[in-house]
Each structure stands twice: as C-alpha cells, then as structure tokens.
Image: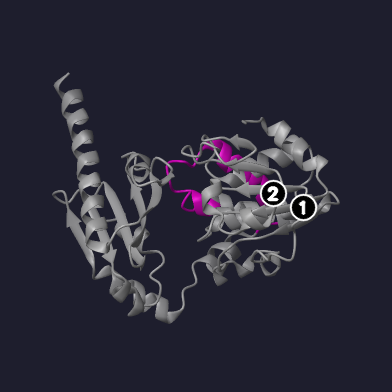
Amino acid sequence: MNVSLGEAAELMSDARTIVITAHVHPDGDAIGSSLGLMHFLRSQGKEVQVLIDDDIPAIFDILPGYELIEKPDPERWQSADLLIALDVSLDRIGRVREMVQAPVLNIDHHITNDGALADKLYLDGNCAATAEIIYQLIRQKKKPFSQKTAMCLYTGLATDTGWFRFSNTTSSVMQAAAELLQCGVRPHVISEALERKPFAQLKGLAAAMGRIELFHEGRAAGAFLTAADLQSMESPDGLIDMIRVIDGTELAVVMKEKEPDVCRVSMRSKGLDVTKIAIRFGGGGHVRAAGCTISQPFETAKKALIEAIDAALEEQEGKERSAFAK
C-alpha cells in the first residue's frame, strides 16, 4: 500500500522500537540515509538500530554511527514495532526480513520498486537519493538537523549524484545540500575519506581495467570478471566509474562472477534507460544507473547480457533515425 510522506512520518512517530535496514552491498546512499534517519529518530526518543546483512566498507567510518551498524542477529530485535527498509526493495535486505518480525515501511527512490513485499511504501522517483527523501521528511516535521544527521544525509546526496555531477543533480538537491552544509558538514572531509583506496585495491583496479572490452561498435564498454579474476585481484570497486568515461561509449557495464552460476551486474549510461535491461534479469535501479544478478554460468550470462545491451542500443538507434527523418 502506497503512503504519503506525512503518513510515513506518522508510522515512525507511533513506533517506539525501530529497526532500519538497507540493501546488501550497501553504498553511500544506503548507509547515509540509514544512519541519518537513525540519528534523527534517536533524537526523538526512539529506540533505533541499523541492521545490514553485509559488511560495511571501511571508507564509511567517517560517518557518525558507523560503528553502531550491526548484522542481523536472531536473538535480538525480534520485538521491534517497525522495520524501515531504505533505498531498496524487500528482496535485497538479506536475513533482516526473516529475523525482524515487524510491519515494514519501505522508503525508496528507485522507480522499479513496486513495494510488493512491504506493508507500506513511500516511493519518490524524482528524488536523486533516498537521503533526499529523509531530508524532506525531517524538514516536513519542522525539526532541526543535527550535525550527525546532516553529515550522513549529505553523504547520501553526494554519492548518489556522483558528487553533484550526474543528471539527477537538481536545484532541490543543491538546496538540500546547502542547508545540510549550514549544519556543520565539512564536504572535503567526507569526499577525501570516501576516495580512500588501499594500495592492493588500487592495483586490483588497474588489473581489472586490463579486462575492459568494447562492443556494439564502441558504443558500449564492459569488464567481465570471472571468479578466478576476482581471486587474483583485490576487489576492484570503482571500476564502473573508470569505464563510463571512455569517449564515444553510451553504456558501461561490469559483470562479476560472485560464485558458480551467480553473476552480479552494474550498468551506467549517458542517456539509455538501463533499467529496461536490468529488469529483464530481475534487477532494477535508475534510468542511468541500474544493476541485476544473473543466475547463469559466466559465459552464458555474459552472452545474454551483451545481447540485451545490443538490443537496447539498436532500439535507441532506431528511435534516433526516426527522429532525424522527421
């Protein structure tokens, strides 16, 4: 059932014990919006815990409350009044759902989230980040932003807009960021912390870049990494951002074989709606940034993915030719 932002806020007001969660393989928006909401709700006298069923990247240790994030534990938090799932559809929160037996409020900005597994859904696809929704919620309640809350929400805004460079950087995003800066956020401290990479990881990124391939006459570029590749290199996080800047490419893709018959895919585009590709494999995301998991052997998955990308680019080319003919 879809609810308004005000109704979502009321659900939080009525609950005393709240668990907040986000997707596995959490990014800056998932962590920033979760911690930002946690700090706000705790300031309102709520008992709140953030549970994420995955390891949290060490670069986020700059955020206040980072050390408070826990993994789901079957012995704790079973009696919560409310489970709030942020920046995610319920099929991507891992064991949290089965261990927290509470009504679910799902808050998200991904247009592919249909809220099918949630009791209540607040979705705003016009927001650049879930952190922007949490910002709006707090502002609607006319409550002040603490420095802790502001720092976390700013991180969500900054990372999901590519440090305010992507097309989802709107005037509303910049106004929100400006207000959060007035609360004591130091943007250079956050950006420098999140840009950190261990030496081994940087070498792994360099090795992974050697796997980049061009296809569809150079309009697409990708790196397809087998399990053996990943074992020989430190996690090459940030690779997709290296690929997307290749001159002449419309789409960048990274596919990693996480285990036999399980390949994780990330896509970025400069205009093509990559959610249409992700949805074909049960994934989702944003128009220009989406992902999915393909449960097939590596070579089969790679072939299917490239065929889907080729089809999407050919469809786009057909529309461009039709528009030009007119």
Amino acid type, callout 1: Ala
Q: Front-most of 207 and 230?
A: 230
Q: Which mark is residue 45?
A: none
Q: Residues within 10 Å of mark 1 (few under 14, many from 20)?
A: some
Q: Front-most of 171 and 63?
A: 63
Q: Front-most of 94 and 45?
A: 94
Q: Residue furthest right?
A: 45
What's the residue at 74%, 38% (across, down)? 9
Measured as percent of width and height from the top left, residue 128 is found at 52, 42
Q: Residue furthest top?
A: 326
Measured as percent of width and height from the top left, residue 263 is found at 34, 60
Quarter of image, res 186: bottom right
- Quadrant where the C terminus sits is top left
Q: Which residue in the structure is indicated by mark 1?
A: 80
What's the magenta region? 158-185
What's the residue at 56%, 72% (across, down)? 58
- Image marks 2 and 1: residues in contact by CB distance under 8 Å: yes
Q: Residues within 10 Å of mark 2 (few under 14, many from 20)?
A: many
Q: Which residue in the structure is indicated by mark 2?
A: 83
Mark 2 secondary-structure assignment: strand
Residue 150 visible to an observer of this rendering: no
What's the residue at 69%, 54% (across, down)? 100
- Quadrant where the N terminus sits is top right
Quarter of image, res 317: top left
Say if 322 sits above or below 298 in the image: above
Amino acid type, callout 2: Leu
Label 2, label 1: how many angstroms apart (C-alpha)?
A: 7 Å
Mark 1 secondary-structure assignment: loop
Measured as percent of width and height from the top left, residue 47 is found at 81, 55
